[in-house]
Image (cartoon, rainbow, N blue to C red):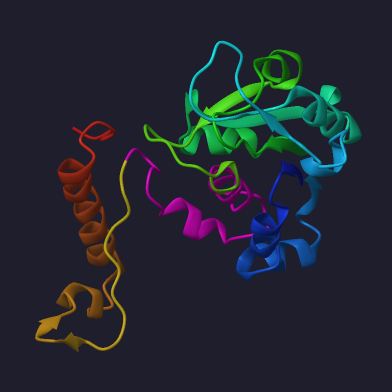
Amino acid sequence: MKFEILSLFPGIIDSFFTSSIMAKAVEKGIIDYSLVNIRGFAFDKHKTCDDAPYGGGAGMVLKAGPLAAALDSVDGRGKRVIYPSPSGIVFDQKQARRLSEYDELVFICGRYEGIDQRIIDMYVDEEISIGDYVISSGEISTLVIIDAVYRLLEGVISGESLLEESFTEGLLEYPHYTRPFDFRGVTVPEVLLSGHHLKINEWRKNERISKTRKNRPDIIDIE
């Protein structure tokens, strides 16, 4: 799978692809990526990529010209283009699975008040929101989506780990414990040391149900 990311600050993105599990996925050839600096497509000597909005108002808007040129450089009209935005559909695990089925995704990292609407109309296939809040960096929201998507690809993370994660079967994940057995007077539940896999699985399922009812009753899928 390939990710092509358009950004004013590609350095923020690069460290993600060269670290940890993602770096291993790139090394294995599971993931490919390219970073496109939008500023490299600005027309004036100052490399201006933003301007005041028509109609007045606070903030600045990313200009259509540099963005369109950057998108054309990656054949944006012929690929799935994602624009992370608070105005988009809310991202969830189901959306991550759907996006993981594409061979290639193009992301536009917004800044300031957003991007010129004409770019959305001409190039963007999906506006996606990572939640009901606003952040300053389109790079961060883009990385949230990419992180949720790439880990679903075969060979990145073991299938067993994915099956037991939050949002699988409409439940959150069960609690985890590791050594030491006793930490500041709080011990690990005895059932996890029993070696009885049926009892452990039953405990974990009950914990998943209890945690979901407490923290996310809106998603629980068990009577």
Q: Residue at x 63, y 30 (%)?
A: 83
In this picture, residue 103 sits left or right of residue 162: right
Residue 85 percent location from the top left of the image: 53, 30
Q: Nearer the viewer, residue 112 or 27?
A: 112
Q: Nearer the viewer, residue 198 or 6?
A: 6
On the rendered image, what quadrant is the C terminus found in? top left
Q: Residue at x 65, y 16 (%)?
A: 117
Residue 192 percent location from the top left of the image: 24, 74
Q: Is residue 196 above or below residue 6?
A: below
How many numbered marks have been drawn onto this rendered protein structure?
0
In this picture, residue 137 sits left or right of residue 41: left
Residue 99 sits in which quadrant?
top right
Residue 70 sits in which quadrant?
top right
Q: Which residues are magenta?
A: 141-170
Q: Is residue 73 magenta?
A: no
Q: Is residue 182 above or below residue 130?
A: below
Q: Is residue 101 above or below residue 9?
A: above
In this picture, residue 118 sits left or right of residue 189: right
Q: Residue at x 86, y 29 (%)?
A: 69
Q: Is residue 12 above or below residue 210?
A: below
Residue 24 percent location from the top left of the image: 70, 68
Q: Is residue 154 magenta?
A: yes
Residue 79 percent location from the top left of the image: 80, 28
> Which residue is at the far left?
185
Residue 145 sits in which quadrant?
top right
